[in-house]
Amino acid sequence: MSTGLRFEISIMLPNRRLQELERFPGFSSGEQQLFRAWSESLQLLKIRGVAEHPFPAPCFLTPASGAEWWSGGSPNRVLLLIFFKHFASSHRLKVHIVYLGHNNGLTPSLTTQFHLQLLSRVFAEPEEARQAILYSYSYGFSGFSAVLNSTQATTLSETEEVISVFRSRMLQLHTTRSWDFMGLSLHSQMEQPSSQMHLKYGDDVIVGILDTGVWPESESFRDDPHLGPVPSSWRGTCVGGQQFDPATACNRKLIGARYYLAGFEAETGLLNTSGGAEYRSARDRVGHGTHTASTAVGAVSPNASYFGGLGRGAARGGAPRARLAVYKVCWFKDLTGRCNDADILAAFDDALHDGVHVISASLGSPPPLSPLFATSTEVGSFHAMQLGVSTVFSAGNDGPDAAMVQNVSPWGVTVAASTIDRRFPTVIALGNNASFVV
């Protein structure tokens, strides 16, 4: 089946650059790079025709109706077999993260300018570099994410200024009584001789949650006049979007909200928002982010319970007086949440600039562990540590085999789940009048 992709190229002798390339609708910049590389290895003078098979694959070029073929200047009927497989694999475009370490005191604008200059080294035109870059990380550290092929990524990794270059992967999400079980009761005074044991439950601490967003209507994030004004150290913002109005969503409790999906869309295509499938905003579609945020900083919500009245009581987070800043980096995909490394690192960069005191991220990649400084979570949490910001991770959902724990970098706090003293006994009555408690 013909792709209908018409092209005209002039091909010189080996090791000479492609001198003319006419692009038609549907001819992407990646395909242009593919033809440019291919042309340097052939000794044909001129080919004109229609591609009858989609790339990448071994491809026959046959004359279209009315098309002329040239070889050495005279028309000839030519059947040409071109092996594109090698070029397709090395020129397939993927999102990569280029990590440069500290920003060395440069302003964000100068840092971004330097990123574009560095990226331009692997593109023929500066405009191509501007189109390829997704994020420029310029506050807490220096780096950028861009759509690159493997050859470009390798070239950048060999550049003196670059510490590491790694593929941006898709990470996964890692679920009232817990705080009382640990002895952190709101209703008891801890009579300890040390004043350090006096708990303020997060009073004016700003916690940044990197997750699937938030339901701003939840009682856990309601406005509370007892909290007082937003801390003067806060430099963040509340970004609006689909079904998320900053005027009503953000308040003295939920003081900031942002969302990031450039990396996600570069890998998976445009976000599906039809019929409430997702929201192009900080609104939570999955529910995971609302859950983790309320567990960490949720306000006291009386008369809360599970369906049917199970576990009825007051629900609250571990630091109910803390302020919440939401950074939506995970999106509904394949019946769960997917989080792209490039988006996560952008959220870390903004959170450090906004002035959070603690970052919480209940997400990670499946085993095996990646090398240090080859994941967004390790790079982001390392620079957070250097700025005095604590990062708390989940240990993952895998196990119980050995080496299943995730997020084990030494500069982060990794938290695993445990059993608690809560049980929901249910009586099962059988037909012979026997009963069992389960």
Image (spheres, rainbow, N blue to C red):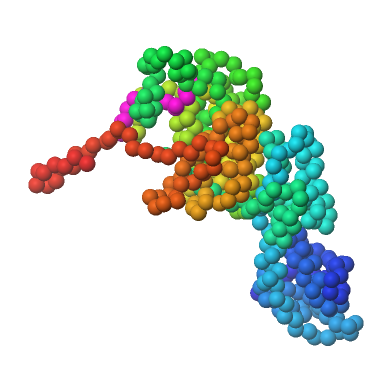
Which of 86 and 226 lies nearest the eye of the viewer? 86
Q: Is residue 221 visible?
A: yes
Quarter assignment of residue 305 = top left
At 61% from the left and 49% from the top, the residue drawn is 374
Report whether 321 appears left or right of 345: left
Q: Is residue 304 magenta?
A: no
At 80% from the left and 43% from the top, the residue drawn is 114
Q: Position of residue 282 (x, y in %)?
A: 58, 36
Report whether 193 appears left or right of 97: left
Q: Position of residue 216 (x, y in %)?
A: 52, 30
Relative to 86, is 102 above or below?
A: above
At 64% from the left and 31% from the top, the residue drawn is 387
Q: Position of residue 207 (x, y in %)?
A: 55, 29
Q: Residue furthest left?
A: 432
Report whether 167 appears left or right of 122: left
Give the position of the N terminus as an image quadrant: bottom right
Give the position of the C terminus as an image quadrant: top left
Q: Residue furthest right?
A: 73
Relative to 342, is 83 above or below?
A: below
Report whether 395 appears left or right of 59: left
Q: Is residue 315 magenta?
A: yes
Which of 249 and 298 lies nearest the eye of the viewer? 298
Magenta-drawn segment: 308-321
At 30% from the left and 33% from the top, the residue drawn is 422
Quarter assignment of residue 181 = top left
Q: Position of residue 341 (x, y in %)?
A: 60, 47
Q: Main secondary structure of the magenta part?
A: loop
